[in-house]
Image: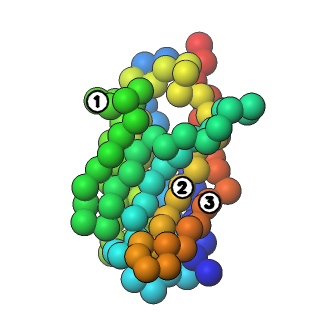
């Protein structure tokens, strides 16, 4: 069972930066996984923030393009999300996600780390 543990959340002011990190454990070959960061605000659906495939291609939500950057380190089994120029609307709980890919598409989620952007 793959386990994902996020870290790096906190309280920042608008315009500041945060770097989230996710560490995967109990995983045999992390490099085959597609991984992503999602976020959720209470009362709203969880939404995709950024994704990086097992080949390294990236996808971003329109709302974070140019401000957020997702990277992965397959040697360390980590996924990072660099968040710059944060805005109050970025306030949410951020979740790390991993998908084992074809054929089984096993999915795993972390417990989430809260990010609050407020003056």
Mark closer to the chain start, 3 or 2: 2
Badge 3 local density, few (<14 within 10 Å), some, or many (20+)? some
Residue 37 in view (yes/no): yes
Residue at position x 62%, y 60% from top?
110
Screen quadrant of the N terminus: bottom right
| Helix, strand or loop status at disc 3 | loop
Location of mark 3 (residue): 110
| Helix, strand or loop status at disc 2 | strand
Height in image: 83 above or below 24?
above
Q: Which mark is residue 96?
A: 2
Asked which quadrant contains residue 89, the reply is: top right
Mark-to-mark CA distance, 3 and 2: 5 Å
Mark-to-mark CA distance, 3 and 1: 25 Å
- Dot 3 and dot 2 residues touching (CB under 8 Å): yes
Location of mark 1 (residue): 66
- State the scheme by which the image is colored: rainbow
Q: At which x and y percent is residue 43?
A: 74, 31
């Amino acid at each position: 069972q793959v386990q994902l543990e996020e870290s790096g959340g906190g309280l920042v002011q608008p315009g500041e930066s945060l770097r989230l990190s996710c560490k995967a454990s109990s995983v045999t070959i992390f490099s085959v996984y597609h991984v992503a960061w999602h976020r959720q605000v209470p009362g709203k659906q969880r939404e995709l923030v950024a994704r990086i495939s097992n080949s390294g291609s990236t996808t971003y939500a329109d709302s974070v393009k140019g401000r957020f950057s997702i990277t992965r380190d397959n040697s360390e089994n980590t996924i990072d999300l660099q968040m710059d120029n944060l805005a109050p609307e970025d306030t949410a709980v951020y979740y790390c996600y991993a998908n084992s890919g074809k054929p089984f598409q096993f999915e795993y989620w972390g417990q989430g780390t809260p990010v609050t952007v407020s003056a």
